[in-house]
Amino acid sequence: MMFLEHKYTINDLVNKCKANDRKAQELLYKLLAAKMLGVCMRYATDRMEAEDMLQNGFVKMFGKIQDYRGEGSFEGWVRRIMVHSSIEYYRKHHKMMQVVEIDNLNEPSVDPVAASNLDAKDLLLLIQQLAPGYKLVFNLYAIEGYSHKEIGEIIGITEGASKSQLSRARTILKEQILKIEAKRYGYAG
Amino acid sequence: MDMQDKEFDKLFSSKLEGLEINPSAKVWKGINGEISGNKHNKLIPFLSIAASIIVLIAAGVLFIPKKDSVVKLSGKKPLAYNKPAKVKPAIIVKPQTVIVSKTVVIAVNKPVHVYHIGKTITPAVTVNKELTAKNTTPVIANNTAVLAANTSAKIDIKQPAIIDSSKALATVQLVVQQPVKPAVIAAVVPPAEKTMDIIPAKKHKIHGIGDLLNVAIAAVDKRKDKIIQFSDNDEDGTSITGVNLGVIKIKKEN
């Protein structure tokens, strides 16, 4: 019941937003802003950048809200806009496909149990520190759930490039996790 | 290996998918500013389009009926047929009468046929008297330097026009000369060049409907550039030569 009521509220707000109701726009923003900043943070290098992406995304969303026809969840629709807004931001501000070549990198093995001790903030920081291309592909594939084909279309790279970037992103992340674990282990000892 | 990758991805997605971080207050301010900014930007072109449409319509309304009225005048040939009754309602003659006086000055040289004219002119001139009496005052208020010259000319010429049949005839000749545009007598401005000499400062002359309107407008609008200014040409008839809407000023030289 609560869920349904919540749903209704969002739909109600969406309809009011379509009529350019400023109050409804603010309420809708407040309802979704924290979640969407969580999305943008993964694509950004820091909070400042993430808030810029968030702002651009919301402005874009309010501009496009007439296009939302109630098919699928509204939150999912907004989330996709945020992702695209973040990618667009990257295109403007970064040389996106600047790929850091990492040769002869050994695949480090990470203990999943140990890694699960890392909290969201640690993981977020790891992603933010990735090179832009890796970060995008990893976010889109591992968290947003896009296929390599879709990712290739969104970013404008080949499917193969998406795959190789993903595996390199994983390798780097694993390395970083090992370093963190090592540090913790070091402190503990 | 594959499993490990999937697990690894899941580690991130499970912890980051539901991540919520409250943005700072400036984000909403920025969004709000951009949204309302957009609305302004959207309004401005609409306003300017609306404004230009209004200006165009106003211009159209002012142009079209005037051309019509000029045509009517020429069609009636009222002076030739000597229908004083009709001459009077054609108050449009008002400004023209002033010009008639001008034409008289120049036309005087030429002797003319008299017959109809003696009749016609008298009513026409009497109308003039009334009108000039009423009109000249505001006119002078408007174009002091210019019309002052005109009025003096009028007085000299008109009165003789009534008294001296010979001079009255002179005006008649003008009518005869340009029989096609009898009503335009007012506009029969061969004197135009000469009046130019007389009136170097400004080109104001009461010539047609346009000038009549100018006078009326001048009575209301005391600015140097009136809200709308007209001029009359032989060829074009009445046309707008100046618009002053406060913000927008358009003025045609000539």
Image (cartoon, coloured by chain):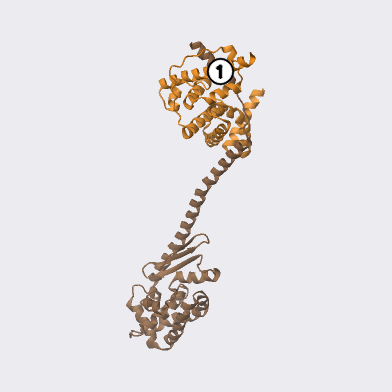
Chain colours: A orange, B brown
In the image, taking residue B183 as reference, residue A49 lies left or right, namely right
Image quadrant assignment for residue A178: top right
Using the image, determine if residue A50 lies above or below residue A106.
Answer: below
Q: Nearer the viewer, residue A134 or A82?
A: A134
Q: Quadrant of residue B161?
A: bottom left
* Percent position of residue A11, x then y: 60, 30
Residue B96 can be seen in this image: yes
The x and y percentages for residue A22 are 61, 39
- For the C terminus of chain A, give its image quadrant: top right
Chain under disc 1: A
Number of marks drawn: 1
Instruction: Inspect the image, locate mark 1, and give the three-letter code of the amino acid beneath it.
Output: Lys
Q: Position of residue B31 (x, y in %)?
A: 58, 38
Q: Mark 1 — residue? A: A179
Q: Tell me which residue sits at (37%, 82%) in the image.
A: B106
Report helix, strand or loop for mark 1.
helix
* Residue B123 in view, yes or no: no
Q: Position of residue A165 (x, y in %)?
A: 45, 21
**Direction from residue B18 to residue A162 in the image, left or right:** left
- Taking the view exactly as shown, the residue that stands out farthest to the right is A2
Residue B148 position (above or below residue B3): below
Q: Residue at x 64, y 26 (%)?
A: A6
Left or right of B51 on screen, residue B198: left
| Camera-nearest residue between A31 and B174 | A31
Quadrant (top left/top right/bottom left/bottom right) for the N terminus of chain A: top right
- The residue carrying pointer 1 sits among few (fewer than 14), some (14 to 19) or many (20 or more) residues within 10 Å by Cα, namely few
